[in-house]
Image (cartoon, helix red, strand yellow):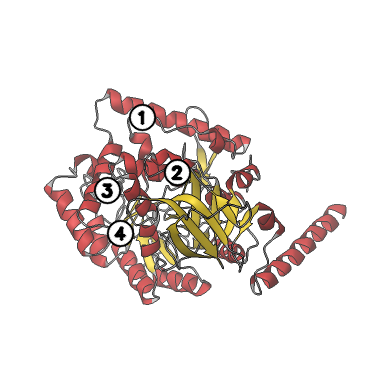
């Protein structure tokens, strides 16, 4: 009886809080106490904020502007102009930011809100069934924002209702986090092994699922590994009929097949294309899952050139997710203490187990003198851009050994430079390209007068040393200047819990 009463009290308290949140979401934006506490300066209203002596990397790929004044007001960038000799900092409305760089807020195009929980994972990489994908509603959005991601596409949802409500709560200034482009639940067919995903059976059910979630308010869709060609075509046509876009992490359908159907975007670079996998059967995901095609398709060979030409002709964007591919590279991914501090004890243990397993795989590959597939993937992405393709950026942060929200987005930009792009090109891929794909380039994606004040401020110069992108000091969203360190401190030990 006592337990039942306690639960009833908890439920009643939760419902009261939920009702209050709903009311505030639908009314004027009143920042929550947490957001007010994390806001270091505020240019979201008529109060003007001037950032003096700052370097501007505008996100367009153009050379950085030195010694600039960035003026913010009403959540917008009012002007970008050279700092005048008589401009002085007052510590309140005019700040001396000498030695710092401002760049657009990152637009993460493969940014999940869930965590991969491996049952009974151990040092031998033995895991139990099933693999579970719990939602990180508290920690993930804060991690993204703290690390400079001001807009994120969820690219596949485990709890789409949660993601939609989270999006609204962020916009209502109740929860700190990036603006969300919410992707519906994974569209996958027979062969699905995830208990938290619905298995579709045929084109009609696929169309109904798209329509249902479009009605609920999702703004993107993602096809997954086990859709048939008929199901994928039905999804593409229905998504387009609703004025939305669809991406895909494919396997049963090849890249050329999907491009001909009209898909908008493909995930994981070129690493999951199965068109040359031995024994590939129509509508079936082979056990090799694209690795065989990646091994034999020369990025400079005729088959790759034909594929890239087809993708460009059909305006198919490619999302680079290099951090999740990095395990196949020749060097160890960096181990960052700040990232480890965010993890719960159990999540940290799993994180290190996964990292250890990846290092073992990498050593074995190098001992066989196999050309690392990671370098091949980097070359594919460079060739795609050289041919006129649109490359997007996102890390697929499912905590697979070394990838966490926000931290992974920074690593993606660094790895684009490793792939041969200049730092300014890599920043454009991770900012303006994503904004353009989402149809938001008139508001975000570059540091230009009239656009939203969604910005990242770092000590140093990422245009010369891309690793400086890790040194996020402040994140500006809608004119509110958040303290990155304070955001991270508020989340220590939480990722993997909630």
- Nearest to the observer: residue 139 or residue 80: 80
Tell me the residue that label 4 is attached to. Answer: 317
For discs 2 and 4, the disc positioned in front in the rendered view: 2
Residue at (21, 48) in percent of width and height: 383
Is there any visible trace of residue 295 in the rendered image? yes
Secondary-structure class at tag 4: strand
Q: Residue at x 13, y 45 (%)?
A: 301
| 3 over 288 or under it: above or below | below
Q: Is 219 left, or right, of 291 in this rendering? A: right
Please tell me which residue lies in front, 176 or 282.
176
| CA gap, disc 2 and disc 3 | 21 Å
C-alpha separation, residue under disc 4 versus residue under disc 1: 28 Å
Q: State the image coordinates of residue 202 (x, y, percent, origin top left).
A: 37, 67
Q: Element type at marker 2?
A: helix
Position of the N terminus, as image quadrant, is bottom right
* Secondary structure state at the residue bearing disc 3: helix
Q: Residue furthest front?
A: 86
**Callout 2 environment at 10 Å: few (<14), some (14 to 19), or many (20+)?**
many
Image x and y of residue 99, in percent? 48, 42
Q: Position of residue 149 (x, y in %)?
A: 49, 53
CA–CA distance in space, label 1 to label 2:
20 Å
**Mark 1 crowdedness (10 Å alpha carbons): few <14, some 14-19, many ≥20:** few
Mark 3 — residue? Answer: 381
N-terminal of the pair, mark 3 or mark 4, is 4
Disc 2 designates what residue? 469
Question: Would you say residue 197 is visible in this rendering?
Answer: no
Instruction: Give the mark nearest the N terminus, 4 or 1.
Output: 4
Which residue sits at x=54%, y=35%? 350
How far is mark 3 from mark 4, CA to CA? 11 Å
Residue 331, label in figure? 1
């Amino acid at each position: 009886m006592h337990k039942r009463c306690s639960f009833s009290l908890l439920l009643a308290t939760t419902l009261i809080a939920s009702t209050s949140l709903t009311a505030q979401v639908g009314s004027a934006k009143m920042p929550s106490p947490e957001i007010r506490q994390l806001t270091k300066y505020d240019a979201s209203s008529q109060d003007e904020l001037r950032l003096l002596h700052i370097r501007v990397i505008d996100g367009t790929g153009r050379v950085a502007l030195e010694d600039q004044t960035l003026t913010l007001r009403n959540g917008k960038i009012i002007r970008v102009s050279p700092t005048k000799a008589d401009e002085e900092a007052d510590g309140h409305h005019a700040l001396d930011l000498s030695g710092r760089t401002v760049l657009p807020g990152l637009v993460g195009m493969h940014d999940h809100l869930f965590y991969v929980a491996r049952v009974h994972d151990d040092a031998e990489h033995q895991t139990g069934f099933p693999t579970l994908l719990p939602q990180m509603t508290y920690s993930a959005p804060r991690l993204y924002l703290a690390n400079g991601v001001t807009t994120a596409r969820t690219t596949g949802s485990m709890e789409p209702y949660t993601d939609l409500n989270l999006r609204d709560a962020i916009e209502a200034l109740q929860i700190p986090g990036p603006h969300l482009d919410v992707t519906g639940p994974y569209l996958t067919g027979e062969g699905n092994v995830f208990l938290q995903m619905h298995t579709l059976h045929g084109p009609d059910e696929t169309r109904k699922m798209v329509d249902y979630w479009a009605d609920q308010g999702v703004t993107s869709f993602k096809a997954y590994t086990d859709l048939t060609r008929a199901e994928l075509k039905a999804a593409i046509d229905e998504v387009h009929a609703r004025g939305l876009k669809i991406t895909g992490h494919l396997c049963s359908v090849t890249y050329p097949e999907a491009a001909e159907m009209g898909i908008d975007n493909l995930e994981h670079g070129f690493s999951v294309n199965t068109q040359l996998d031995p024994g590939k059967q129509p509508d079936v995901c082979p056990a090799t899952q694209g690795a065989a095609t990646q091994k034999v398709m020369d990025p400079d060979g005729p088959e790759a050139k034909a594929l890239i030409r087809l993708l460009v002709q059909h305006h198919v964007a490619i999302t680079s997710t290099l951090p999740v591919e990095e395990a196949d590279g020749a060097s160890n991914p960096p181990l960052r203490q700040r990232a480890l501090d965010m993890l719960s004890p159990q999540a940290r243990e799993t994180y290190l187990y996964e990292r250890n397993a990846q290092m073992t795989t990498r050593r074995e590959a190098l001992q066989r003198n196999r050309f690392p597939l990671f370098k091949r993937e980097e070359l594919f992405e460079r060739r795609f851009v050289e041919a006129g393709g649109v490359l997007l950026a996102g890390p697929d942060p499912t905590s697979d050994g070394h990838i966490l929200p926000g931290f992974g987005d920074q690593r993606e930009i660094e790895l684009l430079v490793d792939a041969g792009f200049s730092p300014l090109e890599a920043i454009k891929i991770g900012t303006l390209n994503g904004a353009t794909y989402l149809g938001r380039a008139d508001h975000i994606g570059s540091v230009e007068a009239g656009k939203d004040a969604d910005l990242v401020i770092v000590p140093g110069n990422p245009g010369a040393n891309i690793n400086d992108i890790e040194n996020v000091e402040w994140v500006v969203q809608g004119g509110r200047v958040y303290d990155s360190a304070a955001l991270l401190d508020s989340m220590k030990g939480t990722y993997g819990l909630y």
